[in-house]
Image: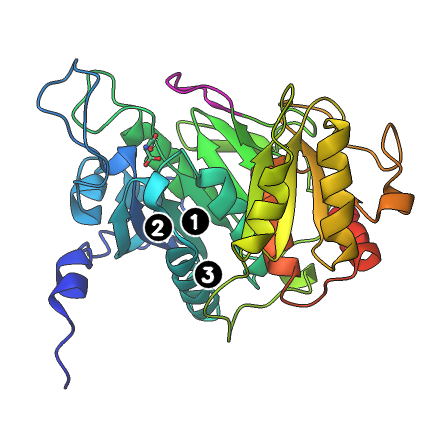
Amino acid sequence: MKKLPYYFRKASVALLVMASLTAFGQKKANVTILATGGTIAGAAASGTQAGYTSGQVTIDAMVNAVPDITKLANIKGEQISNVGSQDMSFEIMLKLAKRINELTKGDVDGIVITHGTDTMEETAYFLNLVCKTDKPVVLVGSMRPSTAVSADGPLNLYNAVAVAADPNAAKRGVLLVMNDWVHSAQSLTKISTTAVQTFMSPINGLIGISNYGVNEFYRYPYNKFGNGSEFKVDNVTALPRVDIIYADVDMPADLIEASVAKGAKGIVIAGVGNGNMPKAALDACAKVAKQGIPVVRSSRVVTGNVGRNVEVNDDQLGLIASYDHNPQKSRILLSVALLTTKSPDALQKIFYSY
Ligand code: ASP
């Protein structure tokens, strides 16, 4: 038999089934943890210092730090990457999506992904679009490294496994569990650089809560995802370049054409207010849109929708309103959607339905 690479051998969690039933007498679910790095796998020289390095601790060590996790589910682990999520890439995200699509066809009941919080909303939203499963797929991270006083990773991981093992978490799209709150990939955003309660779902609210592994669910997402999504990445190896351009007072409008000259196939404007921008920038957007480069107007404001034809005449200029997608999620959606269409009308429908 071909020997597995060292990477995988080291990464496989050697946890055996302790018993086949949970404390509540139910059959234990099979949960696979896919580790990608982040602060949850971070380490510092002391428990109180601010400086640390992400992605230092392996999946085995993370799971071993929460022994009670094996009472919730039969756990297996795989190390997909070990990076701070500032270094997350479409390459790793595609690898993750394909692995989830493989695993969830088998006897796995739920997936947990450990991930840095900086770009967790992008990965969560991407997976929500392209993972073809009804089974729970749950992202989890932490704001404090594993070595910190009051590290938040172990309980977050425990709660994430409890949600992934829960049949009630099915059909709710990709979820994120942090600090007791269960968010939908579609609604969440990171709002604090350092606070443990960093994720919020400002427009649509929480999906539920998980408190010491006891879950309550409040709603299903209203948008399309998973098996209901038209997007597939089985044969995709790269995504088209989409740039986000930040709007502010007197912004240099030439950034928009410069971006296209550098190869952008789509543009997202992190607009002011309801997706607005200065007149010169709007003219530049209309110009590139006429050349066939889709332009999405999103907003740098943390909550609220960007509506079509409010202060900007999108119909006339050929632009797309992001609706409830912030700039980073707009970029993910546009990158994925560009695999199938460049039509502003079709893209506008996509932004309304995902
Ligand atoms: N920079 C870290 C990361 O995203 C921060 C975190 O995980 O909280 O990997």
Mark 3 CB near ligand 1 (8 Å cut): no
The numbered dot on residue 26 is 1
Q: Please report contact status of discs 1 and 2: CB closer than 8 Å, yes or no.
A: yes
In the figure, is residue 172 to the left or right of 81?
Answer: right
Question: Residue 198, percent across and down?
Answer: 46, 22
| 232 lies above or below 80 | below
Magenta range is 191-199
Residue at 33% x, 45% y is: 87
Q: Earlier in the sequence, mark 1 or mark 2?
A: 2
| 3 lies above or below 127 | below
Task: Quadrant for the N terminus, please.
Answer: bottom left
Residue type, label 2: Leu
Question: Residue 171, percent across and down?
Answer: 62, 52
Q: Is residue 43 magenta?
A: no
- Residue holding disc 3: 97
For the residues labelled 3 and 1, the Cα–Cα distance comes to: 29 Å
Q: Is residue 194 magenta?
A: yes
Q: Secondary structure at mark 1?
A: loop
In the figure, is residue 72 to the left or right of 297?
Answer: left
* Foreground pick, 311 / 230: 311
For the residues labelled 1 and 2, the Cα–Cα distance comes to: 5 Å
Q: Earlier in the sequence, mark 3 or mark 2?
A: 2
Q: Earlier in the sequence, mark 3 or mark 1?
A: 1
Colour option used = rainbow
Residue at 51% x, 54% y is: 262
The numbered dot on residue 21 is 2
In the figure, is residue 20 to the left or right of 299?
Answer: left
Residue type, label 3: Ala
Question: Residue 15, percent across and down?
Answer: 19, 54
Residue 170 is at least partly visible in this image: no
Residue type, label 1: Gln
Q: Residues within 10 Å of mark 2 (few under 14, many from 20)?
A: some
